[in-house]
Image (spheres, grey):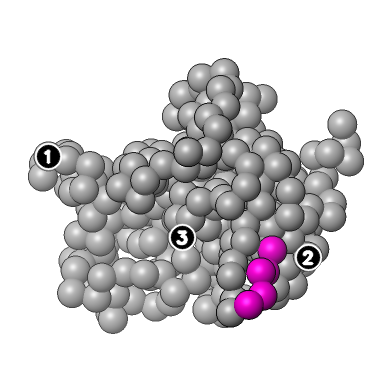
Amino acid sequence: MPETQSAPSVDPSSAKVGDPVIELRGVEKHYQMGSVLVKALRGVDLKIFAGDYISILGPSGCGKSTMLNILGCLDQPSVGHYFLGGQDVSHLSDDDLSQVRGKKLGFIFQSYNLIQQLSVVENIEVPLYYQGVSEKESREIAVELATKVGLGKRLDHKPTELSGGQQQRVAIARALSNDPAVIFADEATGNLDSKSGGDILEIFDQLNADGKTLVMITHDEGMADRTPRVIRLKDGQIAFDTYSETK
C-alpha cells in the first residue's frame, strides 16, 4: 500500500487566494508499452493556487494529456503524491476518484462531449443529477448558467441545432454546474474558428475575473499569451513556470 502523506487541509471550494488548491509532489507516470517502460511524467512538482489562470503548454508527446489526466483525477500517478484541497488523492479507488471529480472539478473538452439526445438545459443538468440535486434546483441552476454563457434563448435546442461555439458554451455551463474548485479546459478552442474561439476565451477571462481557477491545456502560443501563468512541459518535466520564475 503506498505511503500516505499529510498536508494542511484546505477546502478547495473556499480556499483564499494564495492557498495551494492543488499540489503535486514528485509525480511520475509510467506506461508499459510491450517491453518498454515509457515515463510520461518525470518527477513533477507543482502548486496551483486559488484564482490562478494557467496555460499548460507544449508540443505533442510532452506530457500535457497525462498531466491533465492526473490533475483531473482521471488517472493515478505511478510515483509521488497529488493533494487536492489538502487531501491526498494519489491512490484513491476509481469510485472515490469519480466522487472527487464530480464534486470538485469541472471539464471542458475540444469535442464538447455533449449528449446529442438532450437539450441545452438538460446537458447542463447532467452533473447535478449525479450529485443528487433536486430536479427543481437543477433546472434553476441550469437556466441561470445557460443565460450566463449567452444561451438563455436556446434552452430547448439540441446540440445538432447549435454552432460549434454555442456547443462549447453549453460545455462551459455544464462545467460550472457543480461550482468546481478548478476548471480544466483541454484544447477548448481547437474545433472553433478564430471568432468563436476568441469568444470562448473571453468567457474564460471573465470566469477568472470572477474568481474561478482555470487551467488550460494547449499547444497554442496565442492562447498561452493571455494567461498570467504559463507552464511549459518538455519530455514529461516542467521546463518553465512563470510562477517559479517570478518568486
Tell me if residue 98 comes above or below residue 19 in the rendering: below
- Residue 156 badge: none
* Three-letter code, disc 2: Asp
Q: Is residue 232 left or right of residue 74?
A: right
**Whole-Å distance between the Cαs marked 3 and 2?**
25 Å
Residue 61, horizontal then vertical, whole percent: 70, 73
Q: Judge the density around disc 1: few (<14), some (14-19), many (≥20) Cα neighbours within 10 Å.
A: few
Of tags 3 and 2, the one toward the viewer is 2
**In the image shown, does 163 or 104 lie closer to the viewer?**
104
Secondary structure that dominates the magenta span? strand
List the residue tagged with mark 3. 108
List the residue tagged with mark 2. 235
Residue 203, horizontal then vertical, whole percent: 53, 54
Q: Write down the region rendered in magenta.
A: 35-39
Residue 4, horizontal then vertical, whole percent: 53, 30
List the residue tagged with mark 1. 134
Q: Residue at x 62, y 57 (%)?
A: 29
Tell me if residue 165 comes above or below residue 101 in the rendering: below
